[in-house]
Image (cartoon, rainbow, N blue to C red):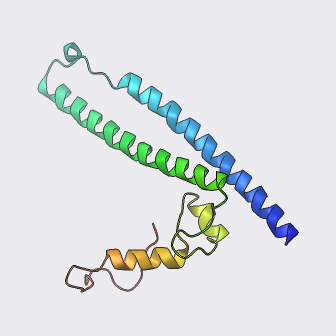
Amino acid sequence: MCQEKYMNKELTLKFKGLFEEQRRNLIYSGRVVNEDFNLNQDDLPDEADITSSELETSMRMRLRNREALFLKKIDEALRRISNGTFGECEQCGEDIDFRRLEARPTATLCVHCKEDQERREHVHIDGHKPKSLGTRVRLA
């Protein structure tokens, strides 16, 4: 039991360091992207340049939105670490397998609960499963 607690504490510190590094990188990249985000209309002489610039702006905004969501997940994981619930499934309370946490450190559900969630998400309103899904469920 003592060995298990030591390993859990060691793994928790490892994940905490990973999350803190990812958080710093996201904040830094956000500053860089935001500095480049301003458009100068004088630099856009024709419609092709304007269209290209709008597409680039749209892609940057989508990237920033994804980064903001990931940053939120990192902050939530750091909060779970500080209150001692990191690695516990939010639905059933069981431990999340270490391999799952290595693959997706921000996971909040064990594999079984995540599969159940995905099965429920793929059921139509009328209760029928889409025919294109098959029986195998992919974990996010």
Residue 27 x, y percent position in the rendering: 51, 34
Indicate the quadrant where residue 22 lies: top right
Up-down relation of residue 129 to residue 107 (above or below) = below
Instruction: Please tell me whether residue 138 is drawn above or below residue 75 in the rendered image.
Output: below
Tell me the quarter of the image containing the C terminus.
bottom left
* Vertical placement of residue 73 versus 68, above or below: below
The image shows a total of numbered marks equal to 0
Residue 106: give x, y in percent of width and height: 55, 57
Q: Which residue shows up at 50% across the image and 52% down it?
A: 73
Horizontal relation, residue 20 to residue 43: left or right: right
Name the residue rendered at 61%, 70% in the picture. Answer: 96
State the image coordinates of residue 108 (x, y, percent, origin top left).
Answer: 53, 64
Residue at 18% x, 32% y: name it.
51
What residue is rendered at 66% in x and 68% in y? 98
To which quarter of the image does residue 39 belong?
A: top left
Extreme residue toward the right, this view: 2
Q: Position of residue 92 (x, y in %)?
A: 54, 76
Residue occupying the far front of the picture: 83
Which of the 4 quarters of the picture holds residue 55?
Answer: top left
Q: Tell which residue pokes out farthest to the top in this image.
A: 42
Nearer to the camera, 96 or 133: 96
Seen as rendered, the residue at the extreme left is 47
Q: Is residue 134 left or right of residue 97?
A: left
Closer to us: 125 or 24: 125
